[in-house]
Image (cartoon, rainbow, N blue to C red):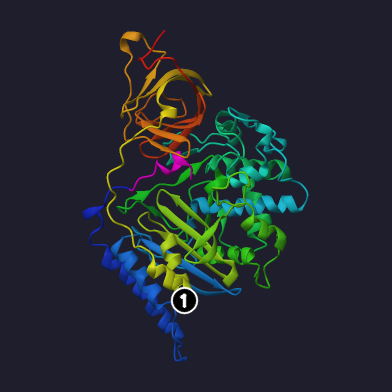
Amino acid sequence: MNGVSAMIFSKGPSAGNARRGTAAFLVSLGLLTLLRVEILAGTKRRQPDPFTEAREKIVSLVEELKVPSVSIAVVKDGAIIWEEAFGLSHFEKKVKAAPETVYAIASATKPFTATGLMILVERGLVDLEKPANAYLKKAKLKACEGDSSAATVRRVLHHTSGIPMYWSFDFGPDSRRRAPLETTIERYGRLVNKPGESYNYSNLGYAVLESIIEEVSGRPYPEFMAAEVFAPLGLKNTTVVTAPPKGAEFAAKYSDALAPVPFCDHDTRGAGAIYSTAHDLALFCLLHLGRLQPEQKEILKPASIAAMQRTRDPEVRTSSYALGWETGKRYGFSIVTHGGVMAGCRAHLALIPSEGLAVAVLANGENVRTIQVCDWVFATLLPTYARNLAAAPSGGGPAGAPPDFRPPAEIVGAWDGLIKTHEGTIPIRLIVESGDRVELIRADQPAESRKGLSPLKPPVFDHGVLVIHFPQAFSLTDAPSRDHRTVLGLTVRGDRLTGEANLIASDMSYSLPSCIELTRAPSTKRWEP
């Protein structure tokens, strides 16, 4: 994530007594699962189970962290060697989770979307080096900074195209209506950074890829994915969900206090609308390990799979995001991974291709680090991984107080300019003093009523980017909440500051970006007409 996105997430409040009294029942279901395994083993000679310790940790996770359920599947050398579920997929109905239970996988959708796009690349229908706009018919990307023609399909895949952070989640029947994707691209598809300049994780970018898939294939994204990705790989319980799911096979979603989380629709389905099972995710991982089972079809050539895991934007050295996958080193091994985080669910896919190994973890709650579960499995099977994991600092202590803000000289002063929304422009002045005073002033208000806004927490300046959280400074018709923040993410460009001004709802249901451009002013006074 870039500076803005890394600073907006916060852990929810402790559930306290709301979760007490449920742990024993949840764990009992996990233990019933273990008992079922023993019964199924019958009188056969049982081999030592390598996953005993990982299983016990998951049982404890269900009990101690109060996540309703966890489902897991492990792949090794082309076979699924462990799949099991623990806890409740539906708390109120007391439905036990099973390996066939279907969960929302949130942003773990992105490797699927990238896979679908690469199918079109192999067919010669999409060129990764062409501008994304070459394939967008109904709405085009526009550039507030840089040139939109440099926002190639490849850079959209890498999150380096300059498309800003964006999301808009619609919860329940009383929420605002989901906007058509072309409307969202028209309003928010504005490059806030030069393409190839920086990494900026963007759901909207993967919605752009969704639109490209639809325009090029002539089929709706859900239909294309079902026919070209899910069915050939034998993913029988995987789907793009566009309406509240019905049926006992779907896991309900819960907050960290075990409060039900309603179905969430959104206008970036290519970024996070797939639901799946741990079993199906394991089958998907087999494709990306190059170890397909006999009944699965090869939908991508090995060269494309390798490119998805290895190629990065050469202009952005700080990014480790390839084509739909996060890549890097973890405890001594090269890893290919992607997580998923949304209200009421968590997911993670983690692959170690050199070992023919992959883990898929799903949960229908929020208070669980699914990558940690992957670590437990890798440590079980890889002694070097286990040693490195054991030697790593445990962390997890209380967060310290945020550091004092000491602005560098290059950003000290007054900056005048505009927030450029899709509904119009808003003149502002930003004052950054050499001490700790930072102030945002709207210039379109009467002089006698102008009030400067102070940051909600200390600003952060890192790698040439200034991030400041202010109280609500403006609003949009797409932002119905009366309670949201204005978060500025500004890149220093000599005597200019440019970037994005995000409206972020207090309940995290939306983040709506607008462009911002400021130039250095001759005075630090509150305002000079």
Does residue 479 show up?
yes
Q: Magenta segment, which residues? A: 1-11
Answer whether residue 2 is magenta in the image. Answer: yes
Q: Indicate the amino acid at tag 1.
A: Pro
- Extreme right residue here? 124
Q: Residue at x 46, y 76 (%)?
A: 383
Of residues 434 and 314, the one nearer the viewer is 434
Give the vertical position of 203 relative to 445 (above or below). Answer: below
Q: Residue at x 38, y 24 (%)?
A: 473
Does residue 234 show up?
no
Of residues 41 and 126, the one nearer the viewer is 126
Residue 507 place in picture, x, y as percent: 36, 39
Instruction: Say whether residue 455 is left or right of residue 411.
Output: left
Image quadrant occupied by the C terminus: top left
Task: Determine crowd level at label 1: few under 14, some 14-19, many 20+ residues with C-alpha closer than 10 A.
Answer: few
Q: Quadrant of residue 522?
A: top left
Q: Quadrant of residue 469?
A: top left
Q: Quadrant of residue 77?
A: bottom right
Q: Residue at x 72, y 36 (%)?
A: 134
- Extreme front residue here? 409
Instruction: Say whether residue 232 is left or right of residue 499.
Output: right
Residue 120 place in picture, x, y as percent: 72, 50
Answer whether residue 470 is magenta in the image. Answer: no
Residue 211 place in picture, x, y as percent: 64, 41
Residue labelled with disc 1: 383
